[in-house]
Amino acid sequence: MKLKTLVLLSLFMLSPAHAAMNHSRMMMDEKGMIMNANPDKLPSDCPKISENVDITIRAGHKHALKFAGKMFAFDQQEWNVKPCAKINITFINDDQIRHQVMVHGLPGYLYPDGMVHLELYGEGQLQASFIVPSQKKTYLVHCELAQHAEKGMKAQLKVDGGNGDLPSIPGISAAVNADSYSVDWTPSTWATLAFFVLLGFAIPLVIIINAASIKVRATKVWATLQTRWKRKVE
Ligand SMILES: [Cu+2]
């Protein structure tokens, strides 16, 4: 390769135009990426867009605090739209780590692999639109990063009321594989439990038996403190 070509190629690689790639179905920059956004192509069963729905989806650890045993979540777990709605998603990542919003089960002739995908590599915000078909259906919305969906980052998008609830949606449906927090009942577990139960009985008992002498001592201590304080003031 000639030096001039090499220099020109290097300049191109370093240019902002290259850093923010805009392919027809994919937008990517240093903050995140959007795949398969579709703001204008109508699904074949939709004569026109029925409604424009603006949905803000926040993702992060703090949204999982209301679900026991969960680590990550979206701020909402369900959205309902009309058939042939155009959905304008504003995706906000409240964490310092990567999160995604992936909608699955969309028609492949409009959405490669049947999905729309928004991803942020850290705190930030992205916007993308897509149009749903007219079919009464429930679509899976989740973050595909390892263990994020299992740890709570799972939701559902219902078109025309949907065709049922998906499993393992926090706060909505039961888990397929429920988390188990079973106790391993070894002799030492029993011994520890017995010790603390006895201690729970013993402490109040000791206080009741020694109530009179405790009162006398407490009165003495109180009197001493009062005398010292008075001396200090004087
Ligand atoms: Cu995530």
Image (cartoon, helix red, strand yellow):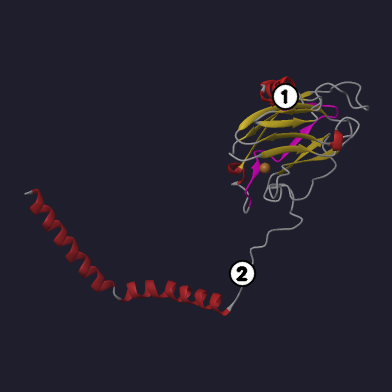
Question: Which residue is drawn at the image coordinates 82% and 29% (left, top)?
Answer: 82
Number of residues whose C-alpha sits closer than 10 Å to that of mark 2, classed few (under 14), some (14–19) or many (20 or more): few
Left or right of residue 29, residue 39 in this image: right
Q: Which residues lie in the magenta part?
A: 70-89
- Mark 1 or mark 2: which comes first in sequence? 1
Mark on residue 183? 2
- Ligand 1 within 8 angstroms of badge 1 C-beta: no
Residue receiving disc 1: 6
Q: Amino acid at mark 2?
A: Val
- Residue 119 x, y percent position in the rendering: 70, 35
Numbered label attached to residue 58: none
Residue most extreme to the left: 234
Pick the quarter of the image with the N terminus. top right
Going by the numbered disc 1, the residue's amino acid type is: Leu
Query: In the image, is residue 124 part of the stretch drawn in magenta?
Result: no
Q: Position of residue 150 (x, y in %)?
A: 71, 51
Find numbered disc 2 in the image and state the secondary structure of the residue it sits on: loop
